[in-house]
Image (cartoon, rainbow, N blue to C red):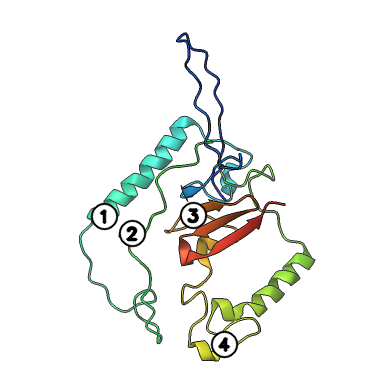
Amino acid sequence: MMHRFSVTVMIVAVAVAGASAQEAPKTSWGAPDLQGVWDFRSITPMQRPEELGDKAFLTVEEVAEIEAAEKEKNERLLNRAAERTTASNSVDSREDGSPGFYNNFWLDNGTSADESRRTSLIVDPPNGRMPALTAAATQRQQEIARIRRGVLFHAPTPGGWVEDIGPGSLQLRCITGFNAGPPMTPSAYNNNVQLFQTEDHVVLLNEMNHNFRIIPLD
């Protein structure tokens, strides 16, 4: 998950007798209770922009400027005049009737940077960027992509599209994919996840496609 969930315990000395510090909620079996709906929106990028080099943190002023620019963009796009569009590469020009993309009204990228003020959600390696793949890893990635073509596209390939469930891949029909992971990452919308706990498992139910992850605790 992209946001770091932390529990801060504060021990406060008070003069009033009988006062006690607030305790973090716990489950009936004594574990920290993390159940609920969590929001992982963030305008902090996954990888640090290359132009920032070794700069791991932004200043308070830089964060304020970035957040203000995001809010200004949303306000500008919300209030701009309506535009008449014609068929193009992004508006109903494909044979399958693909409708292009949503306008900004439907998007929910968030307007806040990570409270740590980091320049990337990746904290290791220190440069905040994903390491380059080795030759062997690149070959494995290409093989996985070949097998999964039927999941991402309308293609009858191993492990993918099956004729009897109708045309369209799993991703095209919004059954899997996008920010649902793994890993779960901030995206254009549906950046919410609900946590359930038992003594033995944690379940993450993602709003996007209603995908869920069951995580054993042993």
Judge depth for marks 2 and 4 and give the one in front.
4
Q: Are marks 1 and 4 in contact (CB under 8 Å)?
A: no
Up the image or down, 49 lies above or below 64; here it is below
Q: Are marks 2 and 4 in contact (CB under 8 Å)?
A: no
Q: Which residue is mark 1?
A: 78
- Please state which amino acid type lies under the numbered disc 1: Leu
Up the image or down, 151 lies above or below 63; here it is below
Q: Residue at x 47, y 57 (%)?
A: 187
Q: Earlier in the sequence, mark 1 or mark 4?
A: 1
- Please state which amino acid type lies under the numbered disc 2: Asn
Q: Is residue 17 visible?
A: yes
The percent coordinates of residue 188 (x first, y second) are: 43, 58
Q: Which residue is mark 3?
A: 193
Q: Which residue is mark 4?
A: 162
Q: Earlier in the sequence, mark 2 or mark 4?
A: 2
Q: Residues within 10 Å of mark 3 (few under 14, many from 20)?
A: many
The percent coordinates of residue 39 (x first, y second) are: 46, 49
Q: Earlier in the sequence, mark 3 or mark 1?
A: 1
Judge depth for marks 3 and 4 and give the one in front.
3
Q: Is residue 143 left or right of residue 176?
A: right
